[in-house]
Amino acid sequence: MTASAEVFRQLVDGVVGKQWDRLPLLYAEDAVVEHPFSTDPAVARLEGRAALRAHFARAAEMGVDFRADDVVVHETTDPEVVVGEFTYRGTLGDKDITMPAIFVLRVRDGLIVSSRDYAGG
């Protein structure tokens, strides 16, 4: 498993484990995360670790409780890039959620520098 694939696993495990305070540390200070399917401009593009810290704090406040099923990691010819497919299942507040997702991460020096997170439900 490449270092990029390991960081993807840490990200998914961190969400599942509700490690909201630790998750921002997986990202570079100037990381950019895009959520192309989001209709909320506040989360469609997150720039920097501070924005990610706020994003994960909102997840904690919303009562996110997910597990990740059917996780498949696709390593690419670029060692910095990994594609992860999975399905989050669980609850968001009092609502049951099934959310298929594909994350395309670029990891440099052990930190996520960019991510395009395609998720919907």
Image (cartoon, helix red, strand yellow):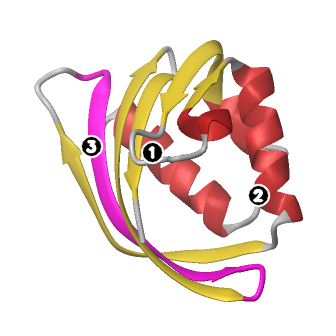
x then y, percent, for residue 18: 75, 64
Task: Tell me the CA gap for discs 3 and 2.
Answer: 23 Å
Span of residues in magenta = 79-94
Mark 2 — residue? 59
* Residue in the picture at 19% in, 47% down: 74
As helix, strand or loop, the secondary structure at mark 1 comes to helix
Q: Distance of mark 2 from mark 1, alpha carbons? A: 18 Å
Q: Quadrant of residue 27?
A: top right
Could you say which is closer to the camera, residue 68 or residue 52?
52
Q: Residue at 81% of width from left, 73% of height from top?
A: 63
Relative horizontal placement of residue 9, taking residue 52 as reference (left or right): left
Instruction: Name the N-terminal-most of marks 2 and 1.
Output: 1
Q: Can residue 1 be seen by looking at this rendering?
A: no
Image quadrant containing the C terminus: bottom left
Disc 3 target residue: 83
The residue located at (47%, 52%) in the rendering is 9
Work out whether residue 79 can be spotted. Answer: yes
Inspect the image, locate mark 1, and give the three-letter code of the amino acid beneath it: Phe
Q: Position of residue 20 (x, y in %)?
A: 79, 51
* Residue at image coords 76%, 47%: 56
Q: Which residue is mark 1?
A: 8
Amino acid found under the numbered disc labelled 2: Ala
In the picture, the quarter occupied by the N terminus is top left
Query: Judging from the image, what secondary structure is the residue with disc 3 in?
Result: strand
> Is 53 inside the magenta-drawn segment?
no
- Rendered position, 31 above or below 59: above
